[in-house]
Each structure stands twice: as structure tokens, then as C-alpha cells.
Amino acid sequence: MTIGRGRSLAAAAIALVACARTLPSPLALPPPDDAAAAHPILTREDALTAVLDGDPLARRTGRVRALALSDVDGAGPIAATLEALTTLESTQVDATQALHVGEHERPGSESIALFRGYRLAMAERSIAASVTAGTPLDFDVASLLAPLATEAHPTAIGRHPLAWLSSDTAALPDALYAYGERWVLEAWLDGPEIPLAPVASLLHADAYDTLALGPIGRLLQARADGLRADPTAALADLDRATLLALTRAAADRDAEQTAWRDLRKAAADELGVDDPVSALLQRAAVGLTADAGNARSAGAALLAIAADRLDGSCVDAPCAGLDRTSLITRAGAWDAQLQRRARVWRVIALKDAIDGMEAGHETVRFNPSLVDLVDALLGTGAFEPPASLLARRTAEEAAWTQLGAMTGDASPKTWADARAILGLQLARETSSALEISDQPSRPLIERIARRAHP
């Protein structure tokens, strides 16, 4: 991966944790919680409360040092993250690259959210500076808010890598804030062992109403409260939505597409909705959130929320993003029985993305199709692409080369070349899904597997 402007980014990071930010309302943080900072740190939850310092998005972690947590049981990931951030601030390294690496070192712990909160703080400062000065957004904002590699000399394409978040250029900064905040909040649900009470209590502040009322915020609070309910009907909704979406993804030929349209219409008429997949996913998320005290239900709710964003009808826009398929993968890690569902949705995400690019690579749909494809690849284990890939408006040789490099093969020069490599990736996904698939989904996954290679 290439190296970006590490020295300036590191300096910005140091400034962020060293002094109060001056972002315009409503971006300004609440004042530091001095009482919380002075409270004895005896437990893992105490440690997290002190580190958050009144901000559930973890944008200021500088008032607690790793040494203060050395004897706190269970606070190892928090202490290690603080130590890594302290080291980052004291050395001249590529800050963005270091943050990318650090985020993956302790999956399922508070570390993910703390790293993302730090990245969000850096991005917010850069966005606010560009808005104030009336200058274009820095490319590095994309690498701070998404798994995109930085570049020393990004290709001048005249488009920001995250411009697809808003069709209105003037509204892009607000879209970036909303996207980044939700991305951090998701990280608190990276695993069932993370103590959520400190985060949930902070979401009650008026400044976080939008986050608290979104699907992720509601799930986080329900998990912190240990809510319990019967998840049977909600799990059935999730499974029905999954099978419907898989049927759609596997419908390539005319007869299959006709059968899918008939199935979709029957489900839509029964439910009284236009989009039965989204309706079932949203209903599943609500029902499963009500049982979030159960780790399996909480993970299934997270899966339903992420899958609904793939469907494009989510209730907390922007639905698009480079975190959707990865969130599905993380949801599958919550419980062994969720792995099967997550594997099916990974197949759906990749198959739909490949089909979308097949139809859109020579049209104005190229960039939206590219976003979906990069998201699906990132969620199925591919390498991070350079940020400039997402800035491309049209299909060019360099785009196919960069796309292929995500899978370890930088040889593609045309869509046909890239499609062949993507077929291998799809074949691997279907193979993994078939190892643990159930009977209703197996024939459809096998159909996709047979046609994975063009």
C-alpha cells in the first residue's frame, strides 16, 4: 500500500487530542466530563467511561493514559489502543495507514471503535477546514472514513472518492459526518463481549438523538439494557428475506427471472408492501433488537440491518457504503448459528455487485456499481484499494487493474479480464457457503456456483 501525507495527518491528530475542537454546531462536542475523568477506574466499564470522556463516538481519548488501566481487569484492549495512539502521535508515520492496521489487531473489542473515533475526529477537522476555507475536500478524508489506502500522489480525476454519498455537492460534508458517525457506532457492536452501558448512557444526550434513534443506536441501547423477547418470528422473517434475496441473485435466465418476479409479487401482496425483502429485514431487525440481551439475536439484528442497507431501502440514509458486507461478516461472528446466514448474504452481496457491474460498466451506473463491488470485495476478504479507485466516473484500464489488485491479481485491463477474476472470488464464496448451508438455500447457491465463471 502506498504512503500518504503522514506527517501532516499525525500533527492534526495530536492537535485534536491536545485541545478542544472548534467545529460548527451541531458538530461541537459536549464539554469534557470532569467528574467522570476523576472517578476511580476499577472496572472495564469504568475504563471505557473515562476514555470516552462524554463522547459516545470516542473522538477524544487523550485524557486517560494506558498506564492508568494496567491493573484493570479486562481493560487490556483499551490500554493497548491508547498506547498505540500515543505512539502514533509521538512518531512521524503515515497516521492513516497506522490507524488502518491498528483497527484490525483486536477484533471484537473496544479497540475498533476507539480507532474509528480517532479517525472520525481527524476527518471532521479536515472537513470543517475545507468548508470554512471553501476549498475541495482532501482525498485523505476518504481513507479516514473508509477502508481505502492512502496515496502519495492520488490520480487527479476531479471527484472525491466518497462523492457518491450525496448527489448534492454542497450537502456532501453533512453526508460524510452522518456516514462516519454511524460507522463508529457500528464498531461498538463488533463483538458480544464489549461493555455497552457507558456508550448507551451517552447516547441519551440531545446531540446524539439521530444516532440513538437509528437502527444501530437502538440495537446498541437494547443490548446494553439486556432486553429479552421471543425472537422466533423475527428469525423467520430474516430467513425468509434471505431466501427471497438469494432467489433474486440466482435468477439469471428468463424463466428464473419470471419465477422471481412472481415470487416477489406474491410476497409483496401478502405483506402489503412494495419491497418484501426490505420490509422483512426491517421487521426482523425490530423483533431481534427486542431480544438483544441474547447474543444470537443481537448479531442477527445487526445482520438484518446491514442486509437492508444492501437492499438500498434502509431507514437511516445513506444506505450505500463500504462497510455493509464487512458488517455482515462481523455479525456472523456473534454466534456460530449466524455464520450460515452471513455466508449466504456474502454470496448475495458479491453476486449482485458483479451483476450490477456487468450491466453498468459502460453506463452512468459505473461509479455506483463500483461502490457496490468494492464493498462486496472488502467484506469477503479482499485488499483495500487506493482511494482514487472510487473517484473514477468511467471504466478505464486503471480501474480494472486496481479492482483486480484487490483480489491479489493486478493483471486485468478490461471488464472481461476483471470479470474472470471476480468469478474466482465468487466461486470461493459459494464454496464456503455450501459447507454450512441449509436445504432451502443450497440449490440456489449451487446454481450461482455453477455460473460463477463467465
Image (cartoon, rainbow, N blue to C red):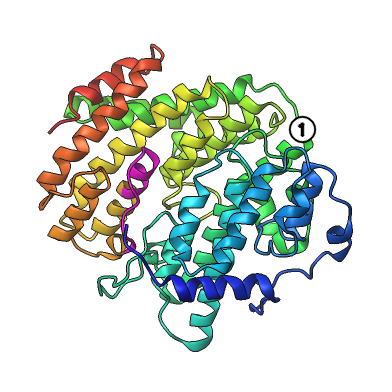
In the image, 129: left or right of 43?
A: left
Residue closest to the far top: 439
x, y percent for residue 354: 24, 41
Q: Quadrant of residue 263?
A: top left
Q: Secondary structure at mark 1?
A: loop
Residue type marked 1:
Gly
Query: Which quarter of the image is occupied by the N terminus?
Result: bottom left
Q: Circle 1 sits on which residue?
A: 226
Residue 39 painted magenta: no
Q: How many marks?
A: 1
Work out whether residue 314 or residue 74 is closer to the camera in this orientation and state it.
Answer: 74
**Does residue 450 appear in the picture of this structure?**
yes
Q: Is residue 10 positioned above or below 217 on the image?
A: below
x, y percent for residue 376: 35, 42
Region of the chain picked out in magenta, as a range: 374-387
Q: Residues within 10 Å of mark 1 (few under 14, many from 20)?
A: some
Work out whether residue 163 or residue 315 is closer to the camera in this orientation and state it.
Answer: 163
Residue shown at 13%/58% (left/top)? Answer: 397
